[in-house]
Image (spheres, helix red, strand yellow):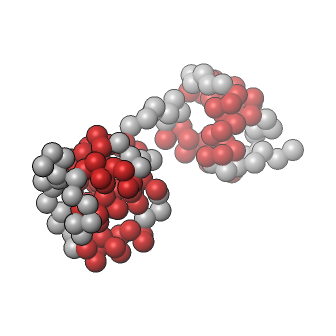
Amino acid sequence: MSGVSQVNIIESIATLKTLLNEQKTSDNFQKIQVLYLLKSKQVKTITEVAQIVGKHRVTIQWWLRCYQQEGIQKFLRDKKDKNSGGRKSIISDSVIKILTKKLRETPDFKTYKDIQHWLNQEFQIQVSYDVVYYLVRKKLKYCLKK
């Protein structure tokens, strides 16, 4: 029968049920749901699973291939993991550490423009005001004193 899964799901049905309850993201919940539905034999084909989960059958096939090659831990890895891609920050971790220390120890910066200028002078890093604001206010959770 076309679309029948040939994936050997190692985890037990009980383990998959437990994992379903532990998931914090909808993607990971759906991934475990796919494994659970196939393991419990509630569905027979990838197309049936795709309809239940609300994903395209190609996505389900890709998920199952990843599961088979990487195992359950890597299969459920967080997309925000540093190794999962995305644009690299213009401002390195070491510069961020220096900036954090400077923000906490000295009141040198009155505005985000001051920080922007300091980054340019000290490290030859040219970033927009928005990048500086996001880094300081959102990422470092530091509020400049007025």
Q: Is residue 139 above or below residue 26?
A: above
Residue at the (35%, 62%) spot, across then down = 33
Residue at the (63%, 48%) spot, across then down = 140
Residue 45 shows in the view:
yes
Quadrant housing residue 116: top right
Residue at the (62%, 25%) spot, across then down = 127
Identify which residue, 45 or 103, lies in the foreground. 45
Quadrant housing residue 22: bottom left
The residue sitting at the front extreme is 1
The residue sitting at the right extreme is 146
Q: Is residue 123 above or below residue 95?
A: above
Residue at the (35%, 75%) spot, across then down = 18
Whole-percent x, y for residue 69 in the image = 17, 50
Q: Is residue 69 above or below residue 119?
A: below
Horizontal side of 44 relative to 114 (left or right) equals: left
Whole-percent x, y for residue 45 in the image = 22, 53
Q: How many labels does the image show?
A: 0
Horizontal side of 140 relative to 43 (left or right) equals: right
Identify which residue, 88 or 59, lies in the foreground. 59
Identify which residue, 120 or 42, lies in the foreground. 42
Residue 103 shows in the view:
no
Quadrant for the C terminus, please: top right
Identify which residue, 50 or 60, lies in the foreground. 50
Horizontal side of 136 relative to 82 (left or right) equals: right
Whole-percent x, y for residue 133 in the image = 69, 36
Q: Is residue 115 above or below residue 127?
A: below
